[in-house]
Image: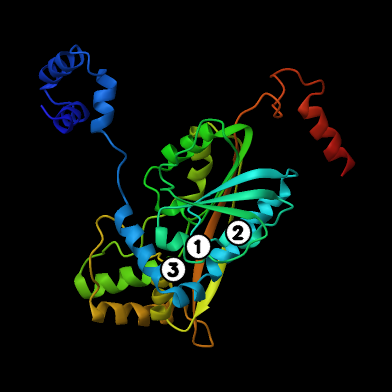
Amino acid sequence: MSAYRVSKYILSGSSKWQTTSYTLRRYTTSGKETAREYLNKAVKPFEVFDRKAKRQQRDRAAARTIDSREVDYLRDEVAARVADRLLDIKRRYHTVVELGSGSGHLAKAVDDDMMDRLIMCEFSQHALNRDADAQYDVEVERRVMDEETPEFDDESLDAVVSSLSMHWVNDLPGMLIQIRKALVPDGVFIGAMLGGDSLFELRASLQLADSERSGGIAARVSPLTNTRDVGSLLNRAGLTLSTVDIDSIVVNYPSMLHLISDINAMGEGNAVVQRLPYIRRDTLLAASAIYKELYGNKDGTIPATFQVIYMIGWKPDPSQPKPLPRGSGKAPLGEIFDSTFKNL
């Protein structure tokens, strides 16, 4: 019985559980591996995004060097804000690892007062080496590595950052767990990802156009993480003292077609597994007209909203501040409130 069929019977509550159980006992008693290891190979994280297609998109975008550099504005802006959050931590790091570095957007925003060396990890080799001749204020090392499965020794990193790449990761909890394992105690992770209502104008316009022209809705814009879920993801991964905030960046474009052109030039095109390979011309033109009618500015441009979720999490350490044990307070909270209201 294949591993897929074994997991299928177990998850569906099939009456063939006895046969499956026997198969597992017979397989594991042979000394090869445990039943849990056998099932873990069969049950993989649910794949929403086509990682191979995403790497090809980034490769093609980076190959058009001039066009790619012209659309660095969003990544550069978010990287600068990530660098500000790293600067707020009153520490100087020897080495910082960046996952999903792209062409070096964070490297432009940091200096030698913050760190000695930055390790840029990116799974698109063309994007990683697009600006290989650029000079930065810190020493830079480039590594071809998939940010979804970072490969570092346990407790070997002081700080890990990620800027605008996590929204294409299928297994976010697994990625964060690997980051937590790689951090030293009291090490910090700082991330920024698109989420919330990013590109809601484009999403709504395409859905309305698809519904009108085709009688249904297609997956034109990738699903995004909800802001409320990010804190739970950090806690699930074992990171403490988590902080989550959201920032909106609105960019104006001449038309929806210009917006889509820039998105493709960034290597941020649709990479959903169940995406359609094409969009009809009449649907695209209808969506552009709907976009301008519903959201257009008075000057004829159209706005595009990018909501960026910033997160900070720390690896647990005994030196970190902790809440006092329950019942250790010396003043009742009710008395404090009563005295406050009386003084108002």
| In the depicted structure, whether residue 16 falls above or below residue 175 | above
| In the depicted structure, whether residue 148 falls above or below residue 184 | below
What residue is rendered at 72% in x and 22% in y? 324
Q: For the image shown, how many numbered marks are present on the structure?
A: 3
- Could you say which is closer to the camera, residue 248 or residue 155? 155
* Disc 3/disc 1 C-alpha distance (Å): 11 Å
Horizontal side, residue 148 vs residue 3: left or right: right
Tell me which amino acid carries mark 2: Ala
Q: Residue furthest right?
A: 343
Q: Which residue is mark 3?
A: 266
The location of residue 217, given as percent across then percent down, is 26, 64
Q: Which residue is mark 1?
A: 103
What residue is rendered at 77% in x and 21% in y? 329
| In the depicted structure, whether residue 220 falls above or below residue 343 | below
The image quadrant that residue 221 belongs to is bottom left
N-terminal-most mark, 2 or 3:
2
The location of residue 222, given as percent across then percent down, is 36, 59
Q: Which mark is residue 159?
A: none
Horizontal side, residue 84 vs residue 209: left or right: right
* Disc 2/disc 3 C-alpha distance (Å): 18 Å
- In terms of secondary structure, where does tag 1 sit? loop
The image quadrant that residue 93 belongs to is top right
Tell me which amino acid carries mark 3: Met
- In terms of secondary structure, where does tag 2 sit? helix
- Which of pointers 3 and 1 indicates the residue nearer the eye? 1
Q: Which residue is mark 2?
A: 107
- Could you say which is closer to the camera, residue 334 or residue 224? 224
The location of residue 325, given as percent across then percent down, is 70, 19
Instruction: Categorize mark 1 by other alpha carbons within 10 Å: few (<14), some (14-19), many (20+).
Output: many
What residue is rendered at 32% in x and 39% in y? 45
Tell me which amino acid carries mark 1: Ser
N-terminal-most mark, 3 or 1:
1
